[in-house]
């Protein structure tokens, strides 16, 4: 899979399909199956993917094509990893807030 250009914000369906080496129809199918994929649409109705969308699509591609998961299995795995990732992010943010509060307390 290709790496993403660092200066680009939005990607078309064909660009994402090329990055993932899949058909555009498969991307549209995954969009219907996985609630996590929510590309924006421009005034003409063309899909515009952001880096976050592509990262999720890479995970889906890996689960389905490399690990051999079913659609339902991939959905469950995504929810599990997303939940644990979100929890880790929240915990890290709370640690940073706690650290800042301790600094403020020590200044008093």
Image: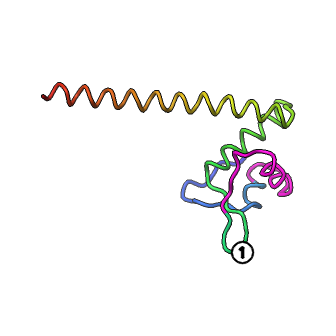
Residue at x-position 61% and y-position 48%: 52
Residue at x-position 62% and y-position 55%: 50
- In the rendered image, the vertical position of residue 24 relative to residue 59, given as above or below: below
Q: Position of residue 56 (x, y in %)?
A: 68, 43
Element type where label 1 sits in the image: loop
Q: Position of residue 48 (x, y in %)?
A: 67, 62
- In the rendered image, the vertical position of residue 85 relative to residue 7, given as above or below: above
* Relative side of 73 to 10, left or right: right
Q: Is residue 104 magenta?
A: no
Q: Position of residue 19 (x, y in %)?
A: 73, 52
Chain part drawn in magenta: 19-40
Which image quadrant is residue 101 in?
Answer: top left
- Badge 1: few (under 14), some or many (20 or more) residues near its Cα, within 10 Å? few
Residue at x-position 40% and y-position 29%: 94
For label 1, the residue is 44
Q: Is residue 34 magenta?
A: yes
Q: Quadrant of the N terminus?
A: top right
Residue at x-position 83% and y-position 57%: 24
């Amino acid at each position: 899979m290709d790496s993403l250009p660092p200066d680009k914000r939005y990607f078309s369906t064909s660009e994402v399909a090329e990055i993932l080496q899949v058909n555009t129809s498969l991307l549209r199918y995954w969009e219907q199956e996985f609630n996590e994929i929510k590309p924006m649409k421009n005034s003409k109705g063309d899909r515009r993917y952001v880096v976050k969308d592509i990262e999720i699509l890479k995970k889906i591609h890996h689960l389905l094509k490399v690990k051999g998961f079913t659609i339902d299995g991939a959905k469950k795995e995504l929810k599990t990893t997303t939940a644990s990732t979100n929890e880790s992010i929240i915990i890290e943010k709370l640690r940073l807030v706690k650290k800042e509060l301790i600094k403020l307390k020590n200044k008093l």
